[in-house]
C-alpha cells in the first residue's frame, strides 16, 4: 500500500508505552485492515508522534494495495495542506472522556463508529492488577479479563474512538 505520511506532534499525548502503545497497535491494525478490505491503494496518514512512524511504515509495506481508492486517516493534528488528493474514505480518531484534556469537540460529521480502545472497563481492571501484585493468580485473572474488554466494536466510554466516513458512497 502506498503511504503518504504527515507528522504533527500533539501536545499532551501520553507516552507511547504500556496501554497507550497497545491502543495505538489496535488503532493502526484496524485502519490498515479496513483500508485493505475497502480497496485502498493509497493511504494518507496524519500521526501525532514520530514514535509511530516505524510502526506505520511496517504495516504499509506488509499491506498490499487492493485497489486504486484513496483513504485518509486523521489520527493526529493535520491541516488541509498536508494532503493534495481527495479521499474516498476518511478515518478519524477522537479522544474520549477518559482522555481528559485531549478531548476534541464533535463537529457533527456523519461518520460510523469502528472501534473504542482502552475502555473504562480495562482501566478499572488495571486497579486490581496494580493492587494485587502479591497474588499472581488474581493478577492473571484480572489481566485475562482486561484483554476481553480492552477494545470494543461498539461505542463505550474509552480513551480512543476510531470513526470511518465512506465518502465514495455520498451523493
Image: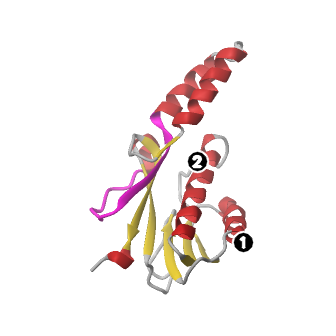
Give residue 120's position: percent from left, percent from top.
46, 34
Q: Is residue 82 in sight in this rendering?
A: no
Residue 35, image quadrant: bottom right
- Crowding around mark 2 (Cα neighbors within 10 Å: few <14, some 14 to 19, many 20+) is many
Q: Is residue 50 above or below residue 170?
A: above
Residue shown at 71% from the left, 68% from the top: 62
Nearer-N-terminus badge (2/1): 2
Closer to the eye: label 2 or 1: 1
Residue picked out by circle 1? 61
Residue shown at 38% from the left, 78% from the top: 168
Q: Is residue 31 above or below residue 115?
A: below
Residue picked out by circle 2? 23
The stretch drawn in magenta includes residue 110: yes
Query: 171 or 95, which is in the foreground?
Result: 171
Q: Is residue 61 above or below residue 133?
A: below
Per the rendering, the mark at residue 116 is none
Q: CA distance from mark 2 to mark 1?
A: 21 Å
Q: Is residue 111 in sight in this rendering?
A: yes
Give residue 45's position: percent from left, percent from top.
56, 71
Give residue 72's position: percent from left, percent from top.
49, 73
Question: Is 136 situated left or right of 74 in this image?
Answer: right
Segment tinted magenta in the rendering: 103-120
- Crowding around mark 1 (Cα neighbors within 10 Å: few <14, some 14 to 19, many 20+) is few
Amino acid at each position: 500500500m502506498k503511504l503518504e505520511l504527515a507528522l504533527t506532534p500533539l501536545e499532551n499525548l501520553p507516552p507511547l508505552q504500556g496501554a497507550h502503545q497497545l491502543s495505538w497497535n489496535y488503532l493502526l491494525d484496524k485502519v490498515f485492515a479496513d483500508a485493505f478490505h475497502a480497496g485502498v491503494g493509497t493511504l494518507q496518514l496524519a500521526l501525532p508522534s514520530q514514535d509511530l512512524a516505524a510502526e506505520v511504515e511496517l504495516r504499509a509495506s506488509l499491506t498490499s494495495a487492493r485497489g486504486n481508492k484513496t483513504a485518509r486517516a486523521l489520527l493526529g493534528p493535520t491541516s488541509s495542506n498536508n494532503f493534495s488528493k481527495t479521499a474516498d474514505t476518511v478515518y478519524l480518531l477522537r479522544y474520549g472522556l477518559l482522555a481528559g484534556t485531549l478531548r476534541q469537540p464533535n463537529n457533527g460529521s456523519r461518520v460510523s463508529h469502528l472501534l473504542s480502545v482502552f475502555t473504562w472497563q480495562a482501566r478499572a481492571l488495571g486497579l486490581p492488577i496494580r493492587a494485587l501484585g502479591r497474588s499472581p493468580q488474581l493478577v492473571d485473572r484480572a489481566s485475562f479479563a482486561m484483554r476481553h474488554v480492552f477494545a470494543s466494536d461498539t461505542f463505550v466510554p474509552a480513551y480512543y474512538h476510531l470513526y470511518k466516513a465512506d465518502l465514495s458512497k455520498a451523493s
